[in-house]
Image (cartoon, rainbow, N blue to C red):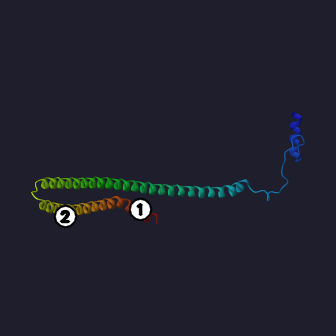
Amino acid sequence: MANRKSAAAQAAAEGEPDLQNPQVEPDLPNEFMPDAAEALEAIVEPAMEMQETVRNALQKGVVETRAAFVKAKASADDAANAFELSFAAAKDGVVAFNAKALAAVRANAEANFDFVKASLEVKSVSDLVTLQSDFARKQTDAVVVQFKDLAELAKKTVVETIEPIKDQVTKSFKIAV
């Protein structure tokens, strides 16, 4: 082995190739081989710029997505509140309508009982006819007023029920546009 090393050392010293331990060396002049640092810089710089561009685009996307989520959540919360207000108005309106209708039924029933009592105390048929015509006129007027009151209450209930939803839809379209 000592001979081999010495032969290799001698060949290297003399500039002759070592046939026992050949090393490939390019025969290209240095001007065609770029410097390793320059080659690395030529690759790394565009890659870093691209990485920075992608990072900025992703960050912008995350920010825009978060903003869109916040808007959507706020809009959904507003819509839920509008529906709650609408349902509460509908419930209150139905309760008021039922109470008013029940009061009308009660008033009509009392008027009918009063008519029956009065008709039992009548002494003649002509008094009964007069009593009947007065009762019919009063009941017709009362029923007209009752229906008018119930219609106004129903209209008010519908408006109060629809108003929160209408306002929310209007607001949502203004935001969207």
Query: Residue 169 — which label?
Result: 1
| Residue ranking furthest to the top | 1
Q: Name the residue nearer the viewer: 112 or 164.
A: 112
Displayed quadrant of residue 13:
top right
Number of disc labels: 2
Q: Is residue 151 left or right of residue 30?
A: left
Residue 122 lies left or right of residue 97; in this view the side is left
Q: Residue furthest front?
A: 125
Question: Dividing the picture into quarters, in which one does residue 155 lie?
Answer: bottom left
With 58 as the anchor, is 81 left or right in this view? Answer: left
Q: Position of residue 89 (x, y in %)?
A: 31, 55
Q: Label 1 sits on what residue type?
A: Val
Q: Is residue 19 above or below residue 31?
A: above
Residue drawn where x is 19% and y is 64% of the image: 137
Closest to the observer: 127 or 40? 127
Q: State the image coordinates of residue 79 (x, y, percent, origin top left).
A: 40, 56
Name the residue at 38% across, 59% down.
165
Numbered disc 1: secondary structure: helix
| Pick the front one: 177 or 136 | 136
Identify which amino acid the numbered label 2 is placed on: Arg
Q: Quadrant of residue 146?
A: bottom left
Residue 41's tag is: none
Local crowd at mark 1 within 10 Å, few (<14), some, or many (≥20)?
some
**Residue under circle 2?**
137
Contact check, label 2 and label 1, Cβ < 8 Å: no
